[in-house]
Amino acid sequence: MYRHFVKYFFFYIYRAKTRQRLLFLAIVGLILSAFSLLVLQSTMGGLQYKLIERSQHVQGHATLFLKNMDFSQAQKLNRELRAAGHQSFLEYEIELLLKKGHYLTAALAHGLDETYGLPAFLQVDELDGLVLPNELAFKIKASYGDHVTLMSPAHVDSLLGDIPRMSSVTVSEIVSTDVPEVDTFHLWLRLPKLQNMVKRRLANRIRLYNAVNAVALKDWLAQKVPHQVHMETWQEQNKTLLWALSLESTVMIFLFIAMTMLVSLCITSGLLIFFDKILTDMSSFWILGASHKQLQRAAAIFLNIMGLVSVLFGLGLGLIFLFLLDNYALNIMPDIFVDRQIPIHISSRGLLVSFFVPYGISMVFSFFSLNQFKKDTNYLDHVKSFS
């Protein structure tokens, strides 16, 4: 029985001569809400995902900070991490001054142990000299084959006063990591070069370039080397960035909730007019034997199906559009941008939000309209009005 009622409602919206166009426009608005929310979340999520992926590719998924650990212990820990399947690299990190001619700038030096090769982002098989990112090289006007000086104010020689220790090194490679905070401040060279300059054989970092189970790895480290290693994941080191990205997503969803509420106001107005137009037909159904409860339930089923179909249709259009955008989009971004194409990242969270936000809000307003119609309608009085 309910199938016939629902079929009647749908045919009245789309085929009746007195069909309510405002309700039809509200349905189109609901479709566009689901479509727009999915597309915007996927494109914004793609930009955020690519940003995080590039940063983790350079800075690693996690960093182990070594405390009160000599070099042999650090090498042993790195071997054990390698044996456990981690892409770990031992290094000594120190803040230095980088000088070439009259140009001087601060830099963060990474002395890399080449026992297990080098991280992939450096794009070299071995460190013959100094690897500079392009932005840092531009600061001091350095190029391939130039000799630059590394100065460590934290380590001094007492000859003729406290003189910062210095080391001369040749620029062997200039790379671009596409991570602005790295390209403007970091540099890489062989670990023995830094150890010779500070006159100590040590290391203070182990970077992991594979996805890790942070809880399990921290427990393992607490058993192996308690109080000597402090581990921080990339997420823990970049809490401010993640908070900003989360705020951006939250504001975007809030704006679309406001937009969907406007669409739902149109649904409310359209339904009130729609129910008023079919009041005579509803009264006829009541005369023929349909109870108030059955008519109410049939209208509720119709509203649920209408909202569900509209939102799913909008999501389907959004997925098709994203597929076409991901596979056939042109390079629309200027050369200054890292991503020339708009990156797409469709997540299960994005799909759920794109479904439940427009569907939930539309159902709240739809049932409000249905409840108002129930309160204000008396079929017997309407039938008497014809006499």
Image (spheres, grey):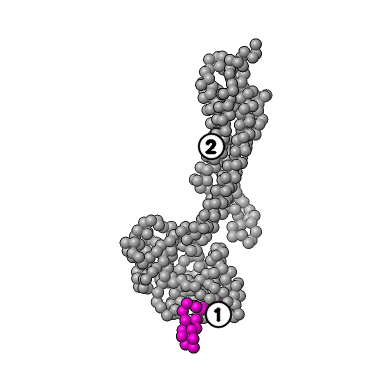
In the orientation shown, which residue stands out farthest toward the top?
Answer: 387
What residue lies at 61% left-to-right and 41% top-to-bottom?
259
Amino acid carrying mark 2 in the image: Gly
In the orientation shown, which residue stands out farthest toward the left?
Answer: 223
Callout 1 secondary element: strand
> In which quarter of the view is residue 305 placed?
top right
Q: Is residue 242 above or below residue 267?
A: below
What residue lies at 61% left-to-right and 25% top-to-bottom?
275
Is residue 144 on the magenta stretch? yes
Residue 360's disc is 2
Question: What distance separates the C-alpha of mark 2 from that of mark 1?
Answer: 65 Å
Which residue in the structure is indicated by mark 1? 147
Amino acid carrying mark 1 in the image: His
Quadrant location of the C terminus in the rendered image? top right
What residue range appears in magenta?
A: 143-164
Front residue of 326/178: it is 178
Regarding residue 237, the answer to whether it shows in the image is yes
Name the spot of residue 335 as percent of width and height, x first. 64, 61
Callout 2 secondary element: helix
Is residue 240 on the magenta stretch? no
Name the spot of residue 246 as percent of width and height, x first. 53, 52
- Going by the image, does 310 lie left or right of 189? right
What residue lies at 48% left-to-right and 84% top-to-bottom?
162
Front residue of 339/279: it is 279
Crowding near the residue tagged with mark 2, few <14, some 14–19, many ≥20 C-alpha atoms within 10 Å: some
Q: Is residue 116 above or below residue 53?
A: below
